[in-house]
Image (spheres, coloured by chain):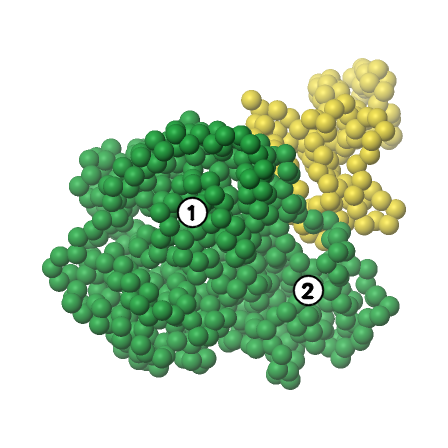
Amino acid sequence: MQRSATIAVLVENEAGVLARVIGLFSGRGYNIDSLTVAPVDEAGKLSRITVVTSGTEMVIEQIKAQLDRLVPVHRVSDLTLEGPHLTRELALIKVTGRGEHRVEALRLADAFRARVVDATTESFVFEMTGNAEKIEAFLALMRPLGLAEVSRTGAVAIARGSSALAA
Amino acid sequence: MSATQAHAPAATEHRSGAEVVLRALKDQGVDVIFGYPGGAVLPIYDALFQQNAIRHILVRHEQAAVHAAEGYARSTGKVGVVLVTSGPGATNAVTGLVDALMDSIPVVCLTGQVPTHLIGNDAFQEADTTGITRPATKHNYLVKRSEDLASTIHDAFYVAKSGRPGPVVVDLPKDILIKAAPYTEAPSQEEPHRSYRPRTEPDRNTVLEAVRMLKRAERPVVYTGGGVINSGPEASRLLGEFVRLTGMPCTSTLMGLGAFPSSDPLFLGMLGMHGTVEANLAMHGCDVMLNLGARFDDRVTGRLDAFSPGSKKIHADIDPSSINKNVKVDVAIVGDAGRIIAALIEAWKADETPVAKEAQSGWWKNIHEWRGRDCLRYVQSGSIIKPQHAVHRLFELTKEDGRDTFISTEVGQHQMWAAQYFGFEKPNRWMTSGGLGTMGYGLPAAMGVQIAHPDALCIDIAGEASILMNIQEMGTLAQYRLPVKVFILNNEYMGMVRQWQELLHGGRYSESYSDALPDFVKLAEAFHAKGLRAETADQLDGVIREMLAHPGPVIADICVAKDENCFPMIPSGAAHNEMILGPDSDGNARAVTDEGKVLV
């Protein structure tokens, strides 16, 4: 039984830490569906990596245990397993064209609450946040309307409620 | 690296980073390092020249420096230390690092690096050492600021020896070694590490659950591994106490040999691919298995879906990632092997669950029957020396000799024969490359052991092919007058390769013949050592005695039967109850399935 897992990893913000995490996934043959990283504390000493992966329960347990034993890793949290959580992704989407397609793209963007952040007479750049399904649904609609380019951040996630993941 | 918070106010300034490096090593209790100089580490060599606290052993190849440090570490329980230069010095060390990683040996390897301003410029003897060694080490560091130098080295030692031990690389740019640098003391032991705090104390409830399971067991078995050795000699003593207290049969992995005395009637011998019948059938037929500090390696389990099918499994390991990696277990105890065994003893004594004694006596009857097959039996007849006989005689004569004896091996048939026919009574006496299977490990490892134990008897049981992979270390033996004995089982074949070609590839011995071998007696003499040779069975004891009596290094070339195979054998892709017992065993025909062929 395969499942998807969104894993939050708090790490030391030091050189090579991302390479360690990515090397672990490639070296042991695990999947990375998306991965994001940025510093998250005031002093800039801690970074948070959000990795979306998939595998059997045994593989996902292995991924977490392998991550946890990396020296610069403080905490590993399987958000999927640990309960309700929020996942968001940001996408910048460029659509080109003229005429009716252009009007339709704008109408759909409005329905999806995508914001126009750049426009020319023959293009729009939409900014949209949401979970991966929402972004994919929007992209599918844009494809026949002149979808030209996409830039996505990958998922970031956080647990609901008052408990916090800290070093 | 942003290890620690730079300038502690009490930091003392040193003339050079190199001096700081040596002071940090000294404060970490280092008395010897194995190394090879080169441009990037010249400042450290200059500082070494001007002090006496740390001894440097000059090896002949950087790979050997790491294996020597492994031998030193494994035989003392201390961290082994290596010093090599940038570029080729570091890349040559990589095999040793992976070897130490696979076998969980604590090693700190200092590598030189081009100065910080040249990093990334493809400078002379530049290599991306931290990049190359990232998957080859437990952890690595590149020191970019002088103020991080001392704290990084302290951190490296902490990481190398804490939790599941392993190799750690500290990459040292030359400008950092030359510039003045502050010294900071090692953090006190009570001060928790900022991110790496492995669990060592087991959960008491889980221990109790394990004890109850074991008491109710009708067919229990204890399976121990290198984790017991790594935990220190006290863990081995406790293991003996626990096994005798419970009366359970005990088997060991290759890496765990010596933790439990081989002469004890409760010991079943080694398990796994070349393990004994009684060990493997006990694993296959048990109803409760207690794994102490082993990792369900593929050499041990054989075919996973047929591994010990009817048993409840308890796994004690210091590394949570070892649990449920290969084999799903019922009870997991995370912690240090010694502390876990101590907790098991305590819980066993306190818990009132009755022991299933009657059923266990039936289990022992089975075991005695399997043992009665005498699976390691061999017949030494005629003048050709059987390799098993050579190891057996070596064992007997070293017992007579009486000195504390340390055995290292290379990799292949001779390694398995050494594991099968040399009995180990104590931990830390057996150095072998288990996980990585590195030919060329044994001679440098024996060298490191001899440095740590100058009066002990250190023997490398070798094959004629493996020994050539690090033969240059004979020069190191000569330089430091290290009386290591190299005992070559010379069958003129890469024996294990030949054995697999016989069993799996229709006897087509592709490239496995050791052609154009050197004359090992003359080779020994060329390296200022003694060379001996035994060609017939009646010469064997005499050669061994002469080897043991000689005060300096010796190569003993033991010409053994060329076509002998190592048995018992669980062919790849087979289960524990599908062992081949010998050349005439009816198992040979169905030995290897197509699925098995893809396995190594």
Q: Give the secondary structure at mark 1.
A: loop
Label 2 packing within 10 angstroms: few (<14), some (14-19), many (20+)? many
Check disc 1 and report the residue beneath it.
Answer: B253
Q: Residue furthest left?
A: B382
The amino acid type of the residue labelled 1 equals Thr
Label 1 packing within 10 angstroms: few (<14), some (14-19), many (20+)? many
The chain letter corresponding to yellow is: A
Which of the two labelled residues, at mark 2 and mark 1, occupies the earlier sequence position? 2
Frontmost residue, A59 versus B553: B553
Q: Which mark is residue B89?
A: none
Mark 2 or mark 1, whichever is nearer to me: 1
> In the visual, does B541 lie left or right of B26?
left
Spatial CA distance of label 2 from label 1 is: 33 Å
Up the image or down, B340 lies above or below B69; here it is above
- Can residue B125 be seen here? The reply is no
The chain letter corresponding to green is: B
Tell me the subunit letter for badge 1.
Answer: B
User: What residue appears at the point 43 percent right and 41 percent down from the top-left corner?
Assistant: B247
- Can residue B80 be seen here? The reply is yes
